[in-house]
């Protein structure tokens, strides 16, 4: 594995699985127990806000029962060395990258610890439930929704991501099934723009054949091993 250049890491639910955060599409995943249309669309929120709030309130509360695992810690260690040459783009709405110490993390699908006011547009760091209709700290209206990018909505910061992919010499995808666009298309964009591409995933994903290299196994083992490899190459 060559050293130097800019690295973009895309993470998905698989990186948090060993921390105890359920994935979406694996057996016992979140989408086995819930219909996407009932909890993760603007239409669901318009018609049944309480159902949607209860789903995200439970997931937010569950964050207090989980801890970052060695894969999150390894990415934080990599950032200590690479600094601005590393960007983690995550599809995850948990806070495990930050709790492991990562600073340069972009949450393209939003964040459970943020509430978005549908009256004034303010975003507020949020740790409690939303189902009871608390007032927005900025405008006082009881109009806070989970700050989550639902199906049919546009992910955050696509410009920023495209710029990072254009500059990347290495693109690494960790723990994502590559079923959901636009994130699933980043590997093709990165390759076209000249980056080497590496996939670290428990098993084959929908995009495995597109990567220059794919490694299979649990993120808690694969990610620290890859980070050590990259750091050793940069020291050589
Ligand atoms: N280590 C590495 N990979 C793992 C592990 C593990 N311990 N456990 C599971 N995986 C892999 C699975 O094999 C699967 O390919 O993680 C992937 C998880 O896939 P999904 O459940 O589809 O999650 P993700 O790709 O993050 O979903 C993308 O879909 O529902 C939306 O907005 C939601 O951000 C989410 C998006």
Image (spheres, rainbow, N blue to C red):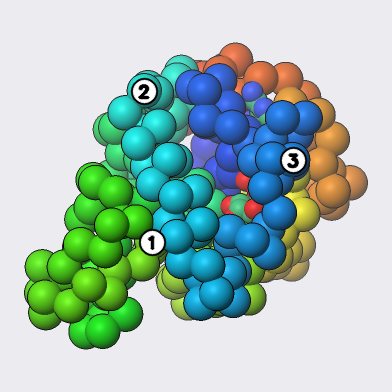
Q: Residue at x 39, y 23 (%)?
A: 66
Return the disc, 2 or 1, that comes first in the chain's sequence.
Answer: 2
Quarter holding residue 180: bottom right
Question: Contact, CB < 8 Å: mark 2 with mark 1?
Answer: no
Vertical arrangement, residue 228 with respect to residue 7, above or below: above
- Residue 201, labelled with which disc? none
Residue 91, how many percent across, how many down?
Answer: 54, 52
Query: Left or right: 153 with respect to 181?
Result: left
Name the residue nearer the viewer: 234 or 223: 223
Q: Quadrant of ligand 1?
A: top right
Find the distance from the CA under tag 1 to the CA under tag 3: 21 Å
Return the disc, 1 or 3, that comes first in the chain's sequence.
Answer: 3
Q: Residues within 10 Å of mark 2 (few under 14, many from 20)?
A: few
Across the whole image, how many numbered discs are drawn on residues?
A: 3
Residue 146, how many percent across, how many down?
Answer: 38, 61
Name the residue nearer the viewer: 35 or 233: 35
Residue picked out by circle 3: 32
Residue picked out by circle 1: 146
Quarter holding residue 140: bottom left
Q: Secondary structure at mark 1?
A: strand
The answer to whether the beta carbon of the residue marked 3 is less than 8 Å from any atom of ligand 1 is no
Residue picked out by circle 2: 65
Q: Quadrant for the N terminus, please.
A: top right
Question: Contact, CB < 8 Å: mark 1 with mark 3?
Answer: no
Q: Is residue 172 visible?
A: no
Query: Left or right: 155 with respect to 37?
Result: left
Q: Residue at x 79, y 46 (%)?
A: 211
């Amino acid at each position: 594995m060559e050293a130097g250049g800019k690295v973009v890491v895309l993470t998905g639910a698989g990186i948090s699985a060993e921390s105890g955060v359920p994935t979406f599409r694996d057996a016992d995943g979140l989408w086995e127990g819930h219909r996407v249309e009932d909890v993760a669309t603007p239409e669901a929120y318009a018609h049944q806000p309480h159902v949607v709030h209860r789903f995200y309130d439970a997931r937010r509360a569950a964050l207090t029962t989980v801890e970052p695992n060695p894969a999150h810690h390894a990415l934080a260690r990599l950032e200590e060395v690479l600094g601005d040459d590393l960007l983690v783009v995550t599809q995850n709405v948990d806070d495990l990258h930050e709790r492991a110490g990562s600073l340069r993390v972009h949450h393209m699908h939003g964040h459970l610890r943020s509430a978005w006011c549908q009256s004034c547009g303010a975003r507020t760091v949020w740790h409690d439930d939303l189902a009871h209709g608390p007032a927005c700290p900025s405008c006082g209206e009881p109009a806070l929704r989970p700050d989550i990018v639902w199906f049919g909505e546009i992910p955050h910061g696509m410009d920023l991501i495209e710029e990072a992919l254009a500059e990347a010499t290495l693109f690494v995808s960790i723990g994502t099934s590559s079923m959901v666009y636009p994130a699933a298309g980043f590997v093709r964009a990165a390759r076209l723009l000249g980056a080497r591409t590496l996939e670290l995933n428990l098993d084959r994903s929908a995009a495995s054949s597109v990567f220059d290299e794919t490694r299979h196994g649990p993120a808690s083992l694969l990610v620290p091993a890859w980070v050590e490899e990259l750091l050793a190459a940069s020291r050589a």
